[in-house]
Amino acid sequence: MNDQQLENKVRQDAAKVKKDVSTLVGDSAARFGRFEDSVSQAAGKAMDDFPKWAEGGASQLTERFEDLAGDAREAVVGAAAAVKKDVGHGLSRYNAKVQELADKAPGGFVKKAARYPWVALSISLVVFFLLGMLIKPARQPLG
C-alpha cells in the first residue's frame, strides 16, 4: 500500500468516523429532546394533577371534621339528655321530700304559706340567715 492509498483510506475512515459522530450527536440531541419533552409533559401533568390532589385531600379533611363534629354533637346531646333526666329525677325527689315535710308541719303551715307567701319567704330568709351564722364559724380563713 502506498502513501496515496493510505491517505485515501485514512480520509475515507475519517469521513466515516465524522459521519458516525454526527449521527451519534444527532441521535443524542433527538433523545435529549424527547427526554426534555417527557420531563416537560410530566411536570405539566403534575401541575395539572396537584390542584385535584389538594382538593381531594381538603375534601377528605373537611368530611373528617364534619364526622368529628357530628360525633361530638351526638355526645353532647346524649350527655345533656342524661343530665336533664338526672336533674329532673333529683328535683322530683327533692319536691317529694319537701312536700312530705310540709304535710307533716303542724298548724296548717302549708295553707298559710300559700295564702301569705311573703311571710313564708321572710321566715325562710331568717332561718337561712341563722343557719349561715351557725355554719360560718366552722370555716377557716385562708392564709
Image: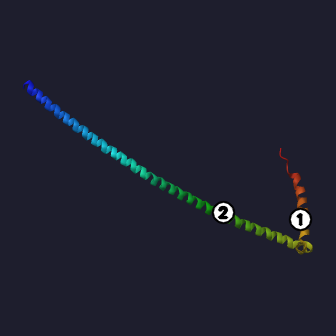
Task: Establish if 126 lies above or below 16.
Answer: below
Image spot of residue 14 (x, y percent): 17, 31
> What amino acid does circle 1 point to?
Ser
Task: Establish if 3 lies above or below 71.
Answer: above
Horizontal relation, residue 143 to residue 55: left or right: right
Label 2, label 1: how many angstroms apart (C-alpha)?
35 Å
Count numbered badges in the picture: 2
Q: Which mark is residue 79?
A: 2
Q: Residue at x 18, y 33 (%)?
A: 17
Describe the element under mark 1 as helix, strand or loop. Answer: helix
Q: Residue at x 89, y 65 (%)?
A: 124
Image spot of residue 106 (x, y percent): 91, 72
Horizontal relation, residue 121 to residue 83: left or right: right
Q: Quadrant of residue 88?
A: bottom right
Image spot of residue 80 (x, y percent): 68, 64
Q: Quadrant of residue 105?
A: bottom right
Horizontal relation, residue 139 to residue 43: left or right: right
> In this orientation, which residue lies closer to the viewer: 29 or 51?
29
Q: Which mark is residue 139?
A: none
Task: Establish if 138 lies above or below 32.
Answer: below
Question: In which quadrant will I find the C terminus?
Answer: top right
Q: Residue at x 13, y 32 (%)?
A: 12
> What amino acid does circle 2 point to?
Ala
Question: In which quadrant will I find the N terminus?
Answer: top left
In the displayed orientation, state which residue is furthest to the left.
1
- Mark nearer the N terminus (2 vs 1): 2
Q: Quadrant of residue 28?
A: top left
In this figure, which colouring scheme has been used for the structure? rainbow
> In this orientation, which residue lies closer to the viewer: 112 or 140?
112
> In this orientation, which residue lies closer to the viewer: 68 or 111?
68
User: Would you name the residue on which mark 1 appears?
Assistant: 124
Q: Residue at x 56, y 57 (%)?
A: 65
